[in-house]
Image (cartoon, rainbow, N blue to C red):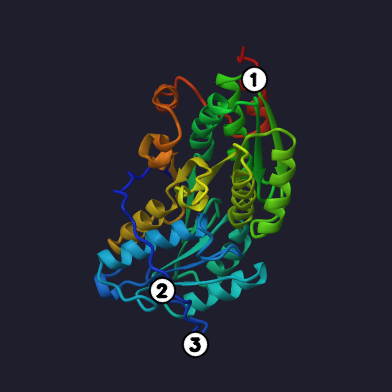
């Protein structure tokens, strides 16, 4: 495949969440729709997504994707559960049948939310060559699949700068969900941001190997906070809920600890104890909205890699950051943001790139 990398412009924020239960209809016909990227006009267009195991209300990645589809559906007068819907996956074995069901139901565009769904999206796209699919956070080599990726390392670098300048113990933590090339982008970008402004800091890194275990999140966070980390950045989906739980419990007992949220602005997740320092916002909502709009307009980006970064507001820091982050630190964040956008600085995405980055840290 001759992959074409396309940068899409971000749409306006202000998305609202509409929570619905997944409708589980579907027929037994094996033939897919004949959309071929031609889309539809308003009520004739149907778009859907399959969640990963974190669920649509994970307050993170899946929820952001659904918010984008919800806004798209409302803006185009589509009916919930008919014109736009989701199917929830309780386990990984649900991915393929959920994708197949939506294809049989003739949806014009079907999203697989998360890199863990790549193999299933590949298989189902081959089974239904006339349907359009999109996957978030992975590249699937197929002419009827749009691959949506992000420069998570850039947004993570910025929250790393905040952590490095905000820590009072010079020790911070990172908790990842499943160790993978994707989550390594969060880890390495964050570590680089911390070290760029505070080379004396130490960074405790651990992986839960699970995106849907609040209990593991709580246990790992307890160990990190207990060992002196006062700020933890999580990129762990539903597992990250447990990080907030531990931070809030410690805050109740008078400890000054913080969480850096991910994917969405997770300020409210830290309430009422108010433990969210900032969040690395990853605009999955923008991605699902934009690609849905393109497809409805007859411009489905099949076979393309669509990448969102700082330059087009695909990643960044939460608007609520000014609640606990000083203007001085936010000014420093803006300096680094400008350097990253202008190409004067490159945020590392891999372990090897981080090692190279550290050679220039003094």
Which numbered disc covers residue 317?
none
Residues at marks 2 and 1 touching, judged by CB atoms closer than 8 Å = no
Mark 3–mark 2 distance (CA, rounded to whole Å): 13 Å
Residue 174 visible? The answer is yes
According to the picture, the residue beneath numbered tag 1 turns out to be 358
Secondary element type, mark 1: helix
Compared to residue 334, the image places residue 219 above or below, namely below
In the rendering, at what x and y percent does residue 249 appear?
63, 50
According to the picture, the residue beneath numbered tag 2 turns out to be 107
Residues at marks 1 and 3 touching, judged by CB atoms closer than 8 Å = no
Compared to residue 279, the image places residue 35 above or below, namely below
Residues at marks 3 and 2 touching, judged by CB atoms closer than 8 Å = no
Compared to residue 165, the image places residue 239 above or below, namely below
Residue 160, quarter of picture? top right
Mark 1 burial class by Cα count in 10 Å: few <14, some 14-19, many 20+ = some
In the rendering, at what x and y percent does residue 202 appear?
69, 26
| Foreground tag (1 vs 3) | 1
- In the foreground, 233 or 224: 224
């Amino acid at each position: 495949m001759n992959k074409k990398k396309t940068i899409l412009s971000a749409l306006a924020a202000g998305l609202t969440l509409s929570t619905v239960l997944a409708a589980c209809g579907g027929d037994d016909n094996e033939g897919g729709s004949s959309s071929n990227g031609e889309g539809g006009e308003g009520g004739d267009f149907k778009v859907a997504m399959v969640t990963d195991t974190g669920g649509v209300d994970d307050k993170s990645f899946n929820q952001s994707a659904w918010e984008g589809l919800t806004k798209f559906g409302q803006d185009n007068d589509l009916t919930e559960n008919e014109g736009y819907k989701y199917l929830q996956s309780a386990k990984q074995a649900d991915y393929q049948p959920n994708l197949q069901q939506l294809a049989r139901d003739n949806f014009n565009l079907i999203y697989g939310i998360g890199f863990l769904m790549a193999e299933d999206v590949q298989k189902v796209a081959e089974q239904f060559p006339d349907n359009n699919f999109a996957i978030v956070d992975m590249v699937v080599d197929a002419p009827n699949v749009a691959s949506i990726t992000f420069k998570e390392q850039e947004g993570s670098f910025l929250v790393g700068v905040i952590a490095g300048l905000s820590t009072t113990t010079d020790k911070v933590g990172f908790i990842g969900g499943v160790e993978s090339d994707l989550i390594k982008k969060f880890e390495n970008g964050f570590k680089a941001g911390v070290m760029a402004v505070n080379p004396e800091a130490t960074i405790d890194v651990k992986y839960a190997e699970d995106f849907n275990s609040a209990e593991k999140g709580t246990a790992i966070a307890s160990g990190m906070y207990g060992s002196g980390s006062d700020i933890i950045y999580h990129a762990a989906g539903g597992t990250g809920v447990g990080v907030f739980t531990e931070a809030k419990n410690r805050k109740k007992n008078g400890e000054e600890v913080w969480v850096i949220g991910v994917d969405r602005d997770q300020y409210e997740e830290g309430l009422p104890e108010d433990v969210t320092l900032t969040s690395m916002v990853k605009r999955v909502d923008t991605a699902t909205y934009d690609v849905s709009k393109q497809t409805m307009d007859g411009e489905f980006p099949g076979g393309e890699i669509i990448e969102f970064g700082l330059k087009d507001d695909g990643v960044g820091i939460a608007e609520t950051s000014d609640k606990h982050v000083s203007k001085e630190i936010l000014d420093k964040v803006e300096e680094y943001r400008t350097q990253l956008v202008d190409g004067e600085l490159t945020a590392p995405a891999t372990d090897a790139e981080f090692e190279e980055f550290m050679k220039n840290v003094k």
